[in-house]
Amino acid sequence: MIWYCRHFPKKKIWPKRWLTAGNNFFKAGMKMRFQDLTGQKFGHLMVLSRAENGKDGGSRYLCICDCGNTKEIRAKHLKSGAIDNCGCLSAQRAQRTLIAHGIGHGGTETRLYRIWSGMKARCYNKNRIRYQDYGGRGITVCPEWLHDFSAFRDWAIVNGYTDSLTIDRIDNDRGYSPDNCRWQTVTEQNNNRRKRRWGKRPKRV
């Protein structure tokens, strides 16, 4: 009679007499192959105890993550480094990616992201109603901001952005860039527009 053994390489078929409890060859092989991971740390995971083997017979361990969550993980994934957290870091990385692209909690766009998108649309989308006042007369967005919302967001936060302010260009004939933009209230922006219009009135002869 022969038995199928999962604990030896290449899933080899072994004679039953080799797998008896008193067989020294089998006992030595099992002792050499098995490694208890209890108490070891793998990345953010601490191994607490053995868990029930998987359906394929692979060893599994109950682990606790630095965040406090517990999870059963296969031994080979712990030892290879394929899994080093309960999944919390993946969620955090995903959230950071969303925020970097202007997506807030619940998948909604942030106000700052809408300002950035509107700024680009006014300069480059010929179908926008106000394109002629921006892109149509040569107003552009600087390369630093054009394809990188995070760069625009960082500048905005450092320069006093709040949800009550709007972006304003200091020189109305220049584009959107860190040295030509500021945050102002709607009232301040309207006053600036009036000053610009008055300053461009032709002098009476």
Image (tube, rainbow, N blue to C red):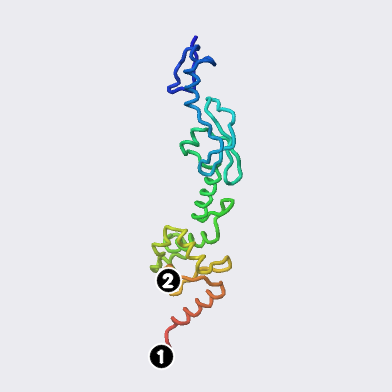
Residue at 48% over, 36% down: 79
- Disc 1 marks a residue whose amino acid type is Val
Marks 1, 2: nearer the viewer: 2
User: In the image, which disc is placed on residue 39?
Assistant: none
| Residue 107, x across and y down, in percent | 56, 51
Which quarter of the image is occupied by the C terminus? bottom left
Mark found first going from the N terminus, 1 or 2: 2
User: In the image, which disc is placed on residue 205?
Assistant: 1
User: In the image, which disc is placed on residue 179?
Assistant: 2
As helix, strand or loop, the secondary structure at mark 1 comes to loop
Crowding at mark 2 (Cα within 10 Å: few <14, some 14-19, many 20+): few
Q: Is residue 173 rendered to the left or right of residue 59?
A: left
- Disc 2 marks a residue whose amino acid type is Asp
| Residue 78, x across and y down, in percent | 50, 37
Answer yes or no: do the residues labelled 1 and 2 have beta carbons within 8 Å? Answer: no
| Nearest the eye: 56 or 114 | 56
